[in-house]
Amino acid sequence: MEYKEIYQQTPDETKLNFPEALLSENKDLQEQFVRCVETAKDADVAFSLNDFYREAENNRSLYLSLFEAVDVILRHQPA
């Protein structure tokens, strides 16, 4: 049987246990894993901050225009 066939027939739990076993036995792989995770976290944080700033600016613009509209309505109402 070829690798792809065996892999497709293997339960997910077994697939997940295999890399965990490799990591627990190999210091170099552990260090690579840590670097990979830290790099991914840094990328996620940077992306999330950009999204946050973009959303904050969109909300600022929306609320500013709403408040300006309220101000105009209040100024033009008869006393």
Image (cartoon, rainbow, N blue to C red):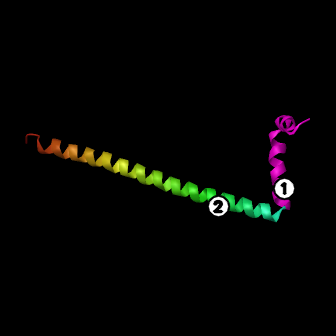
Where's the C terminus, which quadrant? top left
Q: Mark 1–mark 2 contact, CB under 8 Å? A: no
Determine the CA span between mark 1 and mark 2: 20 Å
Mark 2 is on which residue type?
Answer: Glu
- Residue found 86% across the figure and 39% down from its top: 3
Magenta stretch contains residue 22: yes
| Residue 22 tag number | 1
Question: What mark, if any, has residue 38 been given in the picture?
Answer: 2
Q: Residue furthest right?
A: 1
Q: Nearer the viewer, residue 44 or 63?
A: 44
**Which residue is drawn at the image coordinates 79% and 64% (left, top)?**
28
Helix, strand or loop for disc 1: helix
Name the residue rendered at 41%, 49% in the picture: 55
In terms of secondary structure, where does tag 2 sit? Answer: helix
Q: Is residue 15 magenta?
A: yes
Q: Judge the density around disc 1: few (<14), some (14-19), many (≥20) Cα neighbours within 10 Å.
A: few
- Magenta-drawn segment: 1-25
In the picture, the disc for residue 74 is none
